[in-house]
Amino acid sequence: MRILVHGSELSAATAAAALSWVGHKVIWLPHAAASWPQLAASDWLLREPQLIAQLNDSFAKGSLRVLESADSLATLHNDIEILWLALSPEQRGDCDQLLGDLVQHAAEGFVLINNSTFPVGETERLEASLQGHGTAVALPDLLEEGRAWDTFSRPSRWLLGCDDEEATRRVRELLRAFNRRSEVIQRMPRRAAELTKLAINGMLATRISYMNEIAGLADSLDVDVEFVRRGMGADSRIGYEYLYPGCGFGGPNFSRDLMRLADVQSASGRHSALLDQVLDINEHKKETLFRKLWAHFHGQLQGRTVAIWGAAFKPGTARIDHAPVLTLLRALWAQGVHVRLHDPSAIHALLAEVGEHPLLEVFEDDPYLACQGADALLLVTEWKDYWNPDWPRLVSLLGEKLLLDGRNIFEPDWVASQGLYYRGIGRRADPR
């Protein structure tokens, strides 16, 4: 098929790479906010396994090419069969001009695939903008940052919002190479698909926030929350997924989807007290490591130095959008705490966000350098490099022998046996 992908989101880059990989002829028009040269140099895209390599391979084979700007649409023949629209919510107003230009170059049976996180009902509005020259379907973005290629090429499901049989047939053919092992396309009305995507992330966030509330209760009752987590997960009605307490979630898509769901609730006149609580709990949890540090040192933080391991909102990405580390840094700096921070990928993004702060030193190579002269270590992002540290070396570097584990990746008794005070999320142990 002949496809035009429009957008500079991860979902646009992944669609361009994957669809051209399986033989479709793909033209990629990045959004004006980020050109292809900018994207090619971006840390968050370079960190995605296989993606850049596949894009370059498709460029070399000729199955993928990039348009410099929307003005180049005039060079296209009248043969575009699919428009894959992958824009951020704030770019929603840029669609109409593009669609007005594109319908002049569309083939018969043209299908617009809305892969953007737009308000519920936006796919229907996009179809109206086509002025009868095609059909718009919803195919919400379900990619996972850090494994975008795998989640596109080996999907667990596609949510296809489509009311038209011919458009359904075309989308199924478009995605046939990714729908072989089992049937993963779930067809439903367009608004249902748009709402389902938001509802999924709302449910996941609710599980995380509920588990964080239980972890806080476990702390106050001197109960190890790991026993509680395992007991809950063993119940087949609950399961283990997204039951890990931590110091808050972030990310461009997860956080954005929750706010979008809140907007949908508000616009419908149905205020959600539950969703408000989920968002509030998460923001509160981003301060939990600071509160544990404050409690351990009885509020005497001025002039202290701490090491932080991890800035990215999750392992495998260079992004810090809504990341817990941003809230943590602000709280620490307000108390005059010096921060020595290590992250293997997100340092560039962090400095772009917070600038060259006088109380911040950053490290990309050796995480132990960040611990030199530090009173305590705060683990924020559970990069695999951090899971099994050189304990004698770490103990020798931390002046006050304190480890705050924001992801519960360490075993409390083991850490305590090494001579460190351990404070996790609903877990703790003292040196013996």
Image: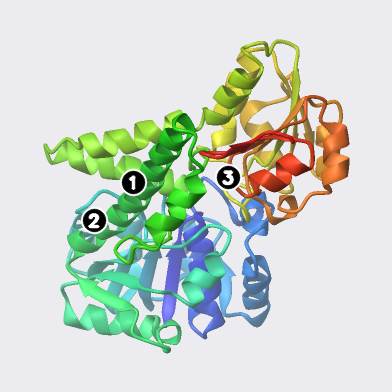
**Cα distance in 3D space between marks 3 and 2:** 30 Å
Residue drawn at 33 percent across, 46 percent down: 206
- The spot of residue 109 in percent (x, y) is 25, 79
Residue drawn at 64 percent across, 27 percent down: 354
- The spot of residue 223 in percent (x, y) is 48, 39
Q: Earlier in the sequence, mark 3 or mark 2?
A: 2
In the rendered image, is residue 82 in sight?
A: yes
What residue is shown with label 2? Answer: 195
**Crowd class of label 2 (few under 14; some 14 to 19; many from 20; radius 10 Å):** some
Asked if labels 1 and 3 touch by Cβ distance under 8 angstroms, the answer is: no
Q: Earlier in the sequence, mark 2 or mark 1?
A: 2
Q: Nearer the viewer, residue 224 or 424?
A: 224
Above or below, 43 relative to 178: above
Q: Is residue 404 rendered to the left or right of residue 201? A: right
Q: Nearer the viewer, residue 20 or 157?
A: 157
- Give residue 278's quadrant in the image: top left
- Tag in front: 2 or 1: 1
Q: Is residue 381 rendered to the left or right of residue 281? A: right
Q: Residue flagged by tag 3: what amino acid is it? A: Arg
Which element carries disc 1, helix, strand or loop?
Answer: helix
